[in-house]
Amino acid sequence: MESSASEKVILKAIDLNAWFGQVHATRGIHFQAAENTVNALIGPSGCGKSTFIRCLNRLHEEIPGTRIEGQVLLNGEDIYTKGIDPVSVRRKIGMVFQKPNPFPSMSIFDNVAAGLKLAGINKRSLLIEVVEKSLRQAALWEEVKDKLKSPGTMLSGGQQQRLCIARALAVSPPVLLMDEPTSALDPISTAKIEELLIELKKEITIVIVTHNMQQAARVSDTTAFFLMGELIELAETSQMFTNPKDNRTEDYITGRFG
């Protein structure tokens, strides 16, 4: 799918292949995401979505025995170029996981400030400013502003997930990856996160793995359908759900398999 001239492609995968040992998990993936969009990845379990998204910020290589071939371009620069620090890549391409994972020994404030401190930012006034901004961006500020010194783990599941989103946003990444961020949450918390995604795309680009096709239809601008390690189709979400080009996409969307 080509972006229109008005859209700037911020993230692009070119012929991306990933392995776990001898298992070829993703095969020749070509993918792109434009600035200020939400991009959903759908497909049955085990089809390579989570592996692919972990390749987009160099998390895949953290698993022993894995390897990657191909390119991932962030604003035209290949993040796999020799000499590029994976940690610096992950500051620019943040990640929110399926299960909320606030740092257990840290307060709400310190959870959000953790990435800034890791980057050497310790000025208290700046930390306070960024923590508040990030919690506001994550639609959590009003709920936690009077208990910033309390442990992050005391929050509800939905609040913990928004805390993790705030933590990722604090370092101002242009791209945020989300691997099924609402699958462990109740419907009310899920709705809050979905509203949040639509608000956040005004400032950042989001790539979200979801098993929930209704969620993909509600929140995303483009949808990519994965099957058996391949990206079968990438299109505007409205087109994907009403007039998919590939029969396999149609079979999955209409529930014939998956």
Image (spheres, rainbow, N blue to C red):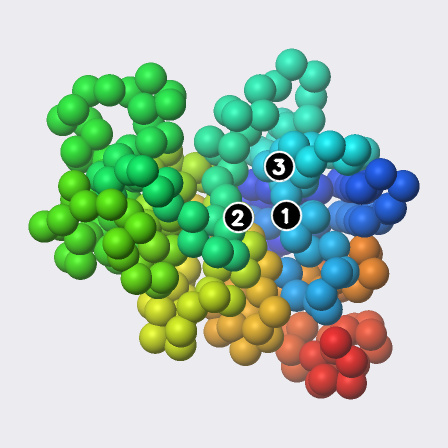
Q: CA distance from mark 1 to mark 3?
A: 9 Å
* Tag 2–tag 1 contact (CB < 8 Å): yes
| Tag nearer the camera, 1 or 3 | 3
Point out residue 16 in the picture as x, y percentages from the top left corner. Answer: 78, 41
Relative side of 21 to 39, left or right: right
Residue 59 can be seen in this image: yes
In percent of the image, x 23 and y 51: which residue is there? 136
Relative side of 27 to 131, left or right: right
Q: Earlier in the sequence, mark 2 or mark 3?
A: 3
Quickly name the residue at label 3.
59
Element on which disc 2 rests: strand
Picture quadrant of residue 239: bottom right
Residue type, numbered disc 2: Leu
In percent of the image, x 17 and y 33: which residue is there? 128
In percent of the image, x 55 and y 70: which residue is there? 216
Compared to residue 248, the image places residue 132 above or below, namely above
Compared to residue 52, the image places residue 199 above or below, namely below
Point out residue 205 in the picture as x, y percentages from the top left corner. Answer: 48, 48
Compared to residue 9, the image places residue 157 above or below, namely below
Compared to residue 187, the image places residue 137 above or below, namely above
Residue type, numbered disc 1: Ile
Numbered-mark total: 3
Q: Which mark is residue 234?
A: none
Quickly name the residue at label 1.
53
Point out residue 162 in the picture as x, y percentages from the top left corner. Answer: 34, 55
Q: CA distance from mark 2 to mark 1?
A: 7 Å
In percent of the image, x 59 and y 49: which residue is there? 33
| Tag nearer the camera, 2 or 3 | 3
Q: Count residues near mark 2 (Cα–Cα under 10 Å), then give few for <14, some for 14-19, many for 20+.
A: many
